[in-house]
Amino acid sequence: MDPDKLDENDWRYHGEGNKSLVVSHIQIPRVLRLLKYPAADSENPQQTAEQAYRQIQNIVDFTSNVMSSFIGEQYIHSGEVVKLPLEFVRQLSIKVQQQRPAWRCNKVMDIYSGCALCLPNLTTPVYAPPTLTPPLCIEIKPKCGFLPSSKHVSKEIKTRVCRFCMHQHHKVSNGIWKKRSLYCPLDLFSGNRQRMNFAIKHLIEEPQNNFKIFKGGQLIYSSRDRDRDDSDDSSDSVSSLLNQLRVYFTCGAQRINGHAGNKSLLSDFIQVLVKALLSGGGASTVDSSHTHTEGRSFCEASALNRERLRHCSQGLPSDCVLSRVLNTQMLDSLDIEGLFPLYRRVEQHLHHFPKERSRLQVEGPYDEMFLQKLQKCPSEDDGSVEFAMAKVHQYRAAMTAKDCSIMITLMPTAEEEDDQQRSGAPSVTFRTLSFSVAVLDLDPKPFESVPRQLRLDQKVVNGYLRSSSGNGPKTSQQREDCTLLFHPV
């Protein structure tokens, strides 16, 4: 990528998170990820160009040296730091501003450092076979897939109801989302295909920030705009989505519309995603002959009717992406309540010995030595600041895994049939859908974020207890069947 030939008109808005904004090239399968900061600081940037460069380089190092060791190199794309002309960045910021969701505009794009993270655009893979139909890319943010069992947990409800389900009550009551999602991460991470199907159905029904679909690099399905004040049934948007997916799973006379056709198509689509999530390696075809690991528990808030489960066997293949992500999440063995005293130990030590920040690698570097501190942390607390720091580092890696994105790219392999007499255009018969799986959004969480995480945990748990007081866990008869409804297309 030649900095002298960069033109803002060759790039388009791709998406954004809390800390960065992403633009994609209209022809080359590349994206640029640029930092954001509060709009109030737009005239006075919070850090220098050198600090911005180091922040992005830390993301690259943490991804390639730390997270790849836990999740697997085959799933990781680390990217590289690039320096961009400031005028290009300013013009790019002006161009994408009108395409940004209004609720994201409390932060602005960094236009002062000229630094960005360059990554492959997984929504338009360069290795996709040439067909009439572009590849699909599904982005899933699975969130935390286990219940804490730490002795430090003070509220028993945390061992029965998962954080995501409790957080849904908090977000709806605070107006962040208008409708509560019935997706439960424990169902997705169970390894039980029926539970996984159920979880993905609810991701599709109420995607929020946890589910997106791209077609040929263009976003075609995500959460409904939070600025819109409507309460329409989601079946319209789901039916519209399935109409776009129809060509990938059916051909010729099988392309039927209506409720029955949509129900079958939805099932086919979900089964492909489940197979991809349970398969080993970064790119492969489906292979279900894996040895499964220990099963995971149920969340009491899940809408799934356990009495209707046809197969009780559960557990994840040890080399699948969900297993890798889950095992990394479980580095959080103490829960935030057990970790916070260790954080305080480190904080007090640094107050008296501020130069120790470098030796303890509080802000990196994220190298082999940092990784060894995570991997070789003793199980028993010896009272040292080194033990406390290692547990905080483990927690930071776990939080990164809890907030990562899994990208499933589906690439149709096809042969054209001359069927113009019947339809006026060639029809496409798909023999297989090859796929690749990758993990993104693997930034290191700041050391100073621990107190904020404790406050959020307390707020979410207490809010859930208040909202559910007097309403015990639902019985199987009270749980929703949660069947998606479709309008004919």
Image (cartoon, rainbow, N blue to C red):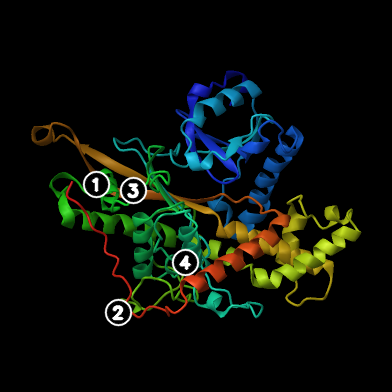
Name the element at disc 2: loop
Residue of label 4: 165
Residues at marks 4 and 1, CA–CA distance in whole angstroms: 32 Å
Between the C-alphas of marks 2 and 3, the distance is: 30 Å
- Foreground: 46 or 442? 46
* Residue that protrudes farthest toward the top in the picture: 4
Is residue 425 left or right of 124 when viewed as pictured? left
Q: Residue at x 35, y 80 (%)?
A: 475
Mark 4 or 1: in front is 4
Q: In the figure, 340 relative to 272: above or below?
A: below
Question: Spatial distance from mark 1 to mark 2, Cα to Cα?
Answer: 34 Å
Disc 2 marks which amino acid?
Gln
Tell me: residue 346, above or below residue 133: below
Q: Quadrant of residue 288?
A: bottom left
Residue 169 image offset from top left, x and y in percent: 47, 64
Residue type at mark 1 is Arg
Name the residue beneath numbered marker 1: 246
Quadrant in the picture for residue 131: top left
Q: Position of residue 164 (x, y in %)?
A: 50, 64
Q: Which mark is residue 230?
A: 3
Counting residues from the start of the chain, the first of labels 1 and 3 encountered is 3
- Residues at marks 1 and 3, CA–CA distance in whole angstroms: 27 Å
Q: Residues within 10 Å of mark 4 (few under 14, many from 20)?
A: many
Taking the image as shown, residue 307 lies to the left or right of residue 338, namely left
For label 2, the residue is 477
The tag earlier along the polypeptide, 4 or 1, is 4
Residue 2 visible in the shown view: no
